[in-house]
Image: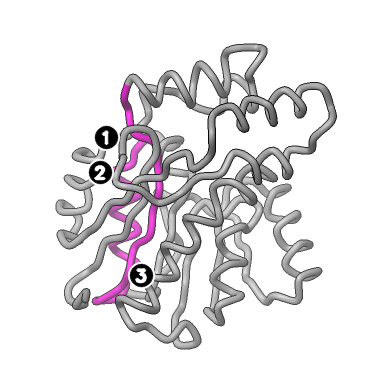
Amino acid sequence: MSLLRTSVNPPRSAYFRKVLIERLHRDPHELRVLDVGCGGGLLSEQFAGMGCDVTGIDLSAPTLMAARRHAEASGLSIRYLEGSADRLDFESGTFDVVCCCDVLEHVDSPDAVVREISRVLKPGGVFFFDTINRTFRSKLVAIKFAQDWRLTRLIPRDVHVWEKFIRPQELTHLLDRHGMPEFELAGLSPAMNPLIALSALIRNKLGRMSFAELGARIKLKQSSDLSISYMGFALRPSCKVD
């Protein structure tokens, strides 16, 4: 969670905010947002802090309890509910925005999840997402480096399965199939000197640097490189993009 908060979330949240406010010209105070697979509430809190009316769902009850405690301590009003991404318990056309991040690469049926997200979006609604590409580079970075190799391991070995990673053309096919043919993709790429990242990782392994500090050193940035991780948004008709 600390790595997500300090490394992944800043460029991702900045991109979503820019799209929503500067390009789509939406007033956050008028938006109902659903965070699918909300986990500890990183994105839910970002949208709530912008003034949105936010609901987060997740399958993990303990994680939802932690999210509720953190939101309360932060003075944010967010509804957290237990639920499945492929069977959203909401009426069709309920939400202005749905976000689904760090989720699609874990589910058994991305098709079912995208279908449900499209269903609960209002006409003109916005779908924000991120996921991991299925490439040699992603296998090296997200599987071998981050999970398998003992000296560099950052997360448990069973967190990611490379075969479940989603190529951009596979995801865009699902978006088009489920009524969201207008979309944009952007890369999430390393933004730091590799030597600085290696030094920070060594200090973390030696117990001299927290995971939050490590995440701040291993920074990501928006890019045009989709080869490892990518994010984006899609629109239900109709909503004009500048």
User: The C terminus appears in which quarter of the rendering?
Assistant: bottom left
Q: Which mark is residue 19?
A: 3
Which percent across, then down, holds residue 40? 66, 53
Amino acid bearing label 1 = Arg
Write down the residue under mark 1. Answer: 167
In the image, 114: left or right of 190? left
Question: Residue visible at 27% across and 34% down?
Answer: 167
Query: Mark 2 and mark 3: span between their CA atoms?
Result: 19 Å
Within 10 Å of the Cα at label 3, are there few (<14), some (14-19), or many (20+) other Cα atoms?
Answer: some
Amino acid bearing label 3 = Val
Q: Quadrant of residue 23?
A: bottom left
Within 10 Å of the Cα at label 2, are there few (<14), some (14-19), or many (20+) other Cα atoms?
Answer: some
Which percent across, then down, holds residue 219? 56, 44
Q: Which residues are magenta?
A: 109-135
Badge 3 marks a residue whose secondary structure is helix
Badge 1 marks a residue whose secondary structure is loop
Within 10 Å of the Cα at label 1, are there few (<14), some (14-19), or many (20+) other Cα atoms?
Answer: some
Question: Residue visible at 57% across and 64% down?
Answer: 44
Write down the residue under mark 2. Answer: 171
Mark 3 or mark 1: whose residue is earlier in sequence: 3
Amino acid bearing label 2 = Leu
Q: Are circles 1 and 2 on residues that touch, CB within 8 Å?
A: yes
Which percent across, then down, holds residue 240? 19, 77
In the image, 213: left or right of 28? right
In the image, residue 3 above or below residue 44: above
